[in-house]
Amino acid sequence: MNFDIGYMVDIFPRILEYLPIVLYMGTLSFILAVIVGLVFAVIINAKVPVLYHLLKVIISYFRGVPTLIQIFIFYFGLPQLIPSLSSMQAITAVIIALSIKNAAYLSEVFRSAFLAVDKGQFEACEAVNMTKWQGLRTVILPQVFRVAIPATGNYYIMMIKETSLAFTIGVVDMLARAKLESAVTYKFLEAYLAVGLIYWAITVVLTFLQSKLEHYMERPYLKEATKP
Amino acid sequence: MSSFKKLSFLLVMSTLILILAACSDKKDDVGSSEASGNSTAKKDVLVVGSSGIYPPFISTDKDGNAQGYDVEVLELVGEALGYEIKWEFAEFSGIFGMLDTGKIDTVANLIAMTDERRAKYDFSTPYAYSGATLVVHEDNTSINSIEDLKGKKVGVLLGNNLHTFLEKWNEENGKEIIITPYQDVSGTYNEVALGRLDAFIDVKITAASRIRNEGLPLKLYGEEYLINFDYGFPFVRSEENKEFLEAFSVEIQKLQDSGKLKELSDKWSAIDVTIPHKK
């Protein structure tokens, strides 16, 4: 096996051209997943009738079926039932499929984060005459977020990498570019390693940002003396 | 304060929805022809799907433009019929799904006209002829026919016509070949070189050029084809496509007759792919 480092360096910029589309798909679906996941978690926590049971089934489906198959069903299957969906662009399909799938997972993260905050705190808030929203905003949510951040960050990183499934339905991303490049040169290992390093670099940056955010959320828990 | 928060939440939501809507809108002007699906005959853009990883027939250059034998054949046909070719690259496993749902009009990926595919799609006149061969280690002496594969580990590309062929042969001959499907071809030749596979079944023309280019200690098992294949462009079966397909096939026949097809074959392929199989 002769590894061609020169080639790897050479294709780096051409693969990096597709970094924006990866970040776009990953980040947008992450934001949507967080929003939808929060809604799911609230519905499940409050046990809203009918919706609660419906959601249990939906979450079970999205957690149980492999992502690739979900994307296929979403992009190729649904348009056969609802013809107007056939004009949906592949990238939209990927974003929506990834959002809902990860929302299903994140709803469990948020649910456990809500459970981590003692019920007595709601009552305490009411006792000091806070409105429900005030209590939620100033007392409950900061604690919920603090608990949820580490696991949520994990999902962000996973979702960035999951976008590499998009080429299956025709969205050319970094991995797709690497496949197309190496098909001509047959230097697959070099191209894939380049892609791997880029993903790793993204993860390192995200991990750093996450630790900053965690530190910020941690402020109220630091002892006066150690506060900066 | 509470209403302000609600407002900002609404704003964020509506922005997101707008972004999503925009990313589907943006491409709609280009893709409106795709949306109408199978009405190939009415438009002047022919959307062609491909894995983009099947040189010398279809691959991409450094700028990401399509290149290869299939590309030039299609461009000549498109030019003659007044169509512009638009390329869509995707994982091979998704290609026929895209064809079925009208995201693409046809496929350029050296698609063999197998009985199973003919049952579902209408094919153009063949534009290439080849067959299956086995890629083996250069020290190999034991594999000289398909019979010799019994008890051996053979790699195939998941879901392609060679996979179907080998499975069927295996079924009829005692199921002794250990067939190992791969999701894509990237690492498969290395598997043979490393001895993890005894052979890999591939189309002769691609195998010959890949062994040469990749510089691995591999060879073809022999000269003969395990099975013959004609290659054409598949279209969704519909009344509207029928007329277009006829004109399309006439153009390919013209290229064949004028020797232009052979010229392109010589340019791209190590072996002449334009000689029809003896029936």
Image (cartoon, coloured by chain):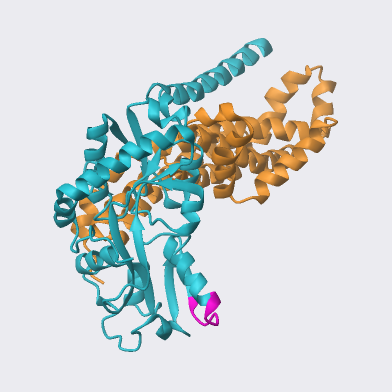
State the count of labels: 0
Return the residue nearer the eye: A213 or A28.
A28
Residue B155 versus residue B244 in the image, above or below: below
Magenta span main SS: loop
Would you say residue B232 is visible in this rendering? yes
Q: Looking at the image, which residue is at 57% across and 48% down?
A: A67
Rendered shade, chain A: orange
Q: Looking at the image, which residue is at 85% across and 31% down?
A: A49
Point out the image quarter for the N terminus of chain B: top right
Return the residue nearer the eye: A22 or B237.
B237
Rendered shade, chain B: cyan
Furthest residue in direction front, as rendered:
B279
Point out the image quarter for the C terminus of chain B: bottom left
Q: Quadrant of residue A148?
A: top right
Would you say residue A19 is visible in this rendering? no
Q: Please indicate whether residue A129 sits to the left or right of residue B271 in the image.
A: right
Return the x and y of residue B227 as percentages of the image width and height.
Answer: 37, 70
The stretch of residues the image draws in magenta is B171-178
Q: Please indicate whether residue A86 sits to the left or right of residue B254 in the image.
A: right
Q: Looking at the image, which residue is at 39% across and 42% down?
A: B106
Return the x and y of residue A20 as percentages of the image width and height.
Answer: 37, 35
Return the x and y of residue A117 as percentages of the image width and height.
Answer: 75, 37
Return the residue nearer the eye: A221 or B192.
B192
Residue B34 versus residue A133 in the image, above or below: below
Q: Please indicate whether residue A36 sits to the left or right of residue B118 in the image.
A: right
Q: Is residue B261 magenta?
A: no
